[in-house]
Amino acid sequence: MDTVSLSATMESVSVLNAFIDDACRRQGVHGDDILSVQLISEELATNICKYAYPDAAGRFETGVSCTPSGCTLMFTDTGEAFDPLSAATPDTSLSLEERDVGGLGIYFVRRKAEKLTYQRVDGRNIVTVSVRFR
């Protein structure tokens, strides 16, 4: 698994995208499949950057392991405990004006993931996502 450690700031999301692109290409993944992995990574990283460290600077680590048929991503951070599996599913039948703010990113990740798990171990959030390519 290729890994990168980044500061939990929104500026790190573009660095993460470049890392994902490079790791995927070296592991035989190309085109739209890379974009899918990047979108999932962006959503998870954005949540960490915005919410994991409300009172201090922090870091997160991302690992990626791919084959031409799919990828597994692992995100870890020591920020506030947050289980994305417990997030309420947004009501997409409502108009944008009627919906609560937030939740669409995690909803997107849930829809794209073949498998999504969360653990809180030794003060660390660990989110693992497996994606299969069609």
Image (cartoon, grey):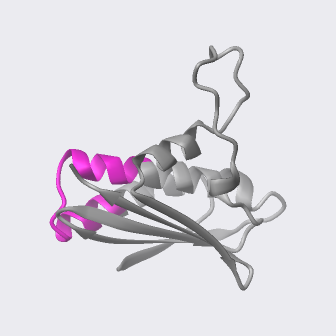
Query: Based on the displayed image, in which of its 4 quarters is residue 70 positioned?
Result: bottom left
Q: Which residue is farthest bottom?
A: 122
Q: Per the image, is 72 magenta?
A: no
- Determine the residue positioned at 55% across, 56% down: 45
The percent coordinates of residue 23 (x first, y second) are 28, 68
Q: Which is nearer the eye, 50 or 97?
A: 97
Q: Is residue 103 above or below residue 3?
A: above
Depth check: give the residue in front, 21 or 105. 105
In this rendering, the answer to whether 29 lies above or below 63 is above
Residue 11 visible to an observer of this rendering: no
Whole-percent x, y for residue 99 in the image: 70, 22
**Badge count:** 0
Specify whether residue 32 is painted magenta. Answer: yes
Q: Would residue 132 be seen by someone viewing this image from the given angle?
A: yes
Q: Position of residue 95 (x, y in %)?
A: 62, 14
Residue at (34, 61) in percent of width and height: 20
Write down the region rendered in magenta.
20-39
Prevalent SS, magenta region: helix
Please say if 118 is above or below 89: below
The reply, left or right, for residue 47 in relation to residue 71 is right
Toward the viewer: 83 or 27? 83
Tell me the quarter of the picture where residue 2 sits: bottom left
* Residue at figure coordinates x 35%, y 80% from the top left: 1
Residue at 45%, 74% (x, y): give it.
4
Give above or below for 34 relative to 99: below
The image position of residue 9, as x and y in percent, is 62, 56
Near-viewer residue (29 or 134): 134
